[in-house]
Image (cartoon, rainbow, N blue to C red):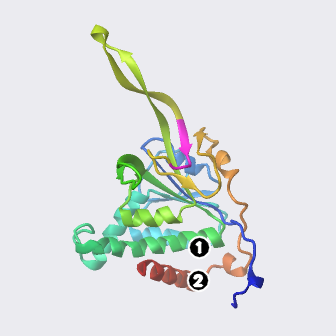
Amino acid sequence: MAVSLSTLRKVKATFPPRTLIYGPPKMGKTTLASEFPGAVFIQTEQGENLDEITSFGKIDSWDDVIEAVRVLYREQHDLKTVVIDSIDRLENLIWDHVCVEQKWQSVPAVEYGKGYAAATVFWAQLFVGLNLLRTEKGMNVILIGHEEVDRFDDPRSASYSRFDFRLHKTAHAMIQNDMDIILFLNQKPGVQEEKIGFGGKRKVAAGTAQRWMHLEGRPSYNAGNRYNMPPEAPYVLGQGYAALSQYFPKTELMANAQAAHATTETWSKAKQEYATAVTAR
């Protein structure tokens, strides 16, 4: 296509969001994801015992994870959201797959970071599939992760600790860049003084049971979004999706026959192009 000023167009976001939900255990991450419409779970761990979810069952290999994504892409269905629960367990499956292919003992043991580099190709394949589900099937994409307290080296100040999602830095960077929303789900901490013997005082943790969806980053945690959402919002059981979705872009499916009848050629071509781009970085 020839590029000129006449080819300029106004564009806006029209595809469903890609959302990462992370936080401490038992905080309601899976429950929040299940509130999204037509949610189907690719479970790499058993997770919470919700009353009912649509799931492929617990998946124990990388091949089955990517096959589940292919099935959602190729076959006709009315599902609206794909959820991977969880990405840190998925990372272990990818590492296991790489080690079998390369005959390595473990990914971290491979010198010069070659093991981690090999794993990025499979993360890239996953993102190809998820983005095809998003752009051609009109599906929301949700990744669920666990939290860790990590050291953050801020060039503007002394280093400090903060909450972040638990992944090796190579996969972490890929997900950080791809997600439209990084949501940290947690309770707000508090500290109060209490009296002890002989007129002394001590500080103890305090807080409420209210859970919060943190949507904008702070020094103490990683979060953010592309939709001008508020910095935080209370999570009320059963109302999380409604609170978030008012800020989502108005979505539309790609109106062509290829979207309705996805082909193996489309999948393979996109996967190859994305993997080539990632390994060239």
**68, above or below 269, in the image:** above
Q: Which mark is residue 132?
A: 1
Q: Would you say the residues marked 2 and 1 are in contact, meaning their CB atoms lie under 8 Å apart?
A: yes
- Regarding residue 52, the answer to whether it shows in the image is no
Amino acid residing under circle 2 = Thr
Q: Residue lying farthest top?
A: 198
**32, above or below 125, in the image:** above
Q: Does the segment drawn in magenta span residue 214?
A: yes
Q: Nearer the viewer, residue 236 or 280?
A: 280
* Image spot of residue 272 (x, y percent): 49, 83
Identify the residue at horizontal 24%, vertical 77% (top origin): 103
**144, above or below 212, in the image:** below
Identify the residue at horizontal 42%, vertical 81% (top origin): 280
**Which residues are the magenta region?**
211-217
Amino acid residing under circle 1 = Leu
* Image spot of residue 133 (x, y percent): 60, 69
* Image spot of residue 111 (x, y percent): 22, 73
Q: Quadrant of the C terminus?
A: bottom left
- Between the C-alphas of marks 2 and 1, the distance is 9 Å
Query: Residue 182 vs residue 261: left or right?
Result: left
Q: Residues within 10 Å of mark 1 (few under 14, many from 20)?
A: many
Identify the residue at horizontal 28%, vertical 72% (top origin): 113
* Image spot of residue 73 (x, y percent): 59, 73
- Regarding residue 115, the answer to whether it shows in the image is yes
Q: Residue lying farthest right?
A: 6
